[in-house]
Amino acid sequence: MTPLGAEIAALIRQNGPIGVDRYMALCLGHPIHGYYRTRDPLGAQGDFTTAPEISQMFGELIGAWSAYVHGLIGRPDPLVLVELGPGRGTLMADALRALRAALPEVRVAPHLVETSPVLREAQERTLTGTGAVWHEGIESLPPGPALILANEFFDCLPVRQFERRPTGWHERQVGLARDGALAFGLSPEPIPGLEADGRDGALMSVPTAGLALMRSLARRLCAEGGALLAIDYGHVRPGFGDTLQALSGHRFADPLAAPGEADLTHHVDFAALAKAAEAEGAARHGPVDQGDFLAAIGLFARAGRLKARANPAQSAAIDAAVSRLTDPGRGGMGSLFKVLAVSGPSLGPLPGFAAP
């Protein structure tokens, strides 16, 4: 058992089983043993790869999108560009390069919300000289209109899970098996007030942390202006099923096997996020498939321009990156990943999203 696993087991022995949301929070954010506190998880030597690490085209297109939306929100100067969970800073660096080329007369103020000391060090190296400012949470972000980027961020925020039994919806918990290993179980009593339809045995995930954050961001955007662009893997229609998963060495793993040593994520419920934003008065744009979004904002044209100056090996690499970012089939991100934008209610159609 990992050091964090032993600590969680001791906590359960003392206080009883814990919810999946608390388990996720401990595994990812424990101050000593948390997954994101102790490592750089990205790339071939890590556990997963994100779109900005696949190709610079991804971040450059997000920067071009931001430049266009800057005009829609009143051309603020400086432009506050925020990224939530910015990885190694690759997306921000590529977006800044495109933004500053498109808007040379506008000051761009990058702000990064990051809790991992390891990743923050990587971001500082990547973003040296950009004037970037770091934050532990959204509460300390500067006021005023902002463009907020969240690429593969909502998927790692803790979720609560519930299983339908004849007596009602019981919360899924992490407890201890007879041999002392961590094991899933259910709360003995059903959760009052939870009345969703579902057959016996159905499993439902409720992204409590993500919904709370979305509500806060939506209130800010309605009050101060700007837009949020969220890109993640997930679904656009509510449904049942267990999407909690662990990744280790680019392979799926048992979520309970090595607490603190594997990434824990879940499929993002875009319908629930959009509903939460709309409940605060915000406008939602999308969600749409990532492949469709990138095509609409110019990925294929950008790839063509790069290939015109590329040698055969570089051209093949560009084609491979485009395929991975847009293909809907197995191994591609095109339809598994969705894109959702949220803004104040008066902001018109945004690039990449069909007009309602």
Image (spheres, helix red, strand yellow):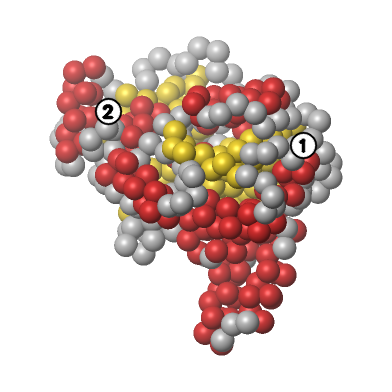
Q: Residue at x 44, y 37 (%)?
A: 134
Q: In the figure, is residue 108 to the left or right of 49?
A: right
Q: Which residue is mark 1?
A: 74
Q: In the figure, is residue 211 to the left or right of 136?
A: right
Depicted 337 relative to depicted 348: above or below: below
Indicate the position of residue 34 as horizontal and vertical percent values: 28, 38
Q: Residues within 10 Å of mark 1 (few under 14, many from 20)?
A: few
Depicted 92 relative to depicted 211: above or below: below
Indicate the position of residue 6 as horizontal and vertical percent values: 17, 34
> Viewer-proximal residue, 276 or 228?
228
Q: Would you say residue 208 is visible in this rendering?
A: no
**Callout 2: SS:** strand
Indicate the position of residue 153 as horizontal and vertical percent values: 50, 42
Front label number (2 vs 1): 1
Q: Residue at x 29, y 23 (%)?
A: 17
- Name the amino acid type tagged 2: Gly
> Viewer-proximal residue, 105 or 287?
105
Q: In the figure, is residue 80 to the left or right of 2?
A: right
Q: Which residue is mark 2?
A: 175
